[in-house]
Image (cartoon, grey):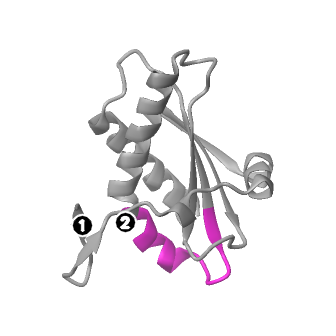
Amino acid sequence: MSAEPSGEGRLRRACLKKSEILRHKRAISALFEAGRKIQVPYLQVFFHVAPPCSAAKAMVLFSVSRRLVKRATARNRIKRLLREAYRLQKWHLLDALSEKLGPEQQLHLALLYHPQRQPLTLERATKAVLQVFAKILQQL
């Protein structure tokens, strides 16, 4: 079990619940139609502030294109690395969102893998996710 310190000196569980995964068809289509786009190494990100679909402050979608990564095992590994990087670092985003978003607002994120010359590792995925969080918080 991994834990990250919070501002109050207590430990926080780093988990990614099913309710934090974006699965609603209408919410996904609204995200891609009205959302803003950010590009960082390894990731293309769409984000949108929307009415809440669940109790989570942020909902996320992970996607790897079949056109860019042919083998299913490679796509699954990339998605697993992205989920792990997000899970371990999401507290940075959630702490800032609690100050920036109102009670009737929720952040929807789509993290789309964009291949680079170097293969994706957990360290590179974590760095990319932190860059995404910083850019999103600047634009909110």
Relative to 52, does residue 130 appear above or below in the rendering? Answer: above
Label 1, label 2: how many angstroms apart (C-alpha)? 8 Å
Q: Residue at x 58, y 61 (%)?
A: 59
Location of the C terminus by quadrant is bottom right
Residue 58: image x %, image y %? 55, 65
Residue 75: image x %, image y %? 50, 27
Relative to 53, does residue 137 appear above or below in the rendering? Answer: above
Task: Name the residue type under label 1.
Answer: Glu
Q: Is residue 95 rendered magenta in the image?
A: yes
In the picture as drawn, the residue positioned furthest to the left comes out as 9
| Residue 41 seen in the figure | no
Relative to 111, does residue 19 appear above or below in the rendering? Answer: below
Residue 87: image x %, image y %? 38, 55
The circle drawn on residue 4 is 1
The circle drawn on residue 34 is none
- Residue range (magenta): 91-107
Residue at mark 2: 91
68 relative position to 115: left or right: right
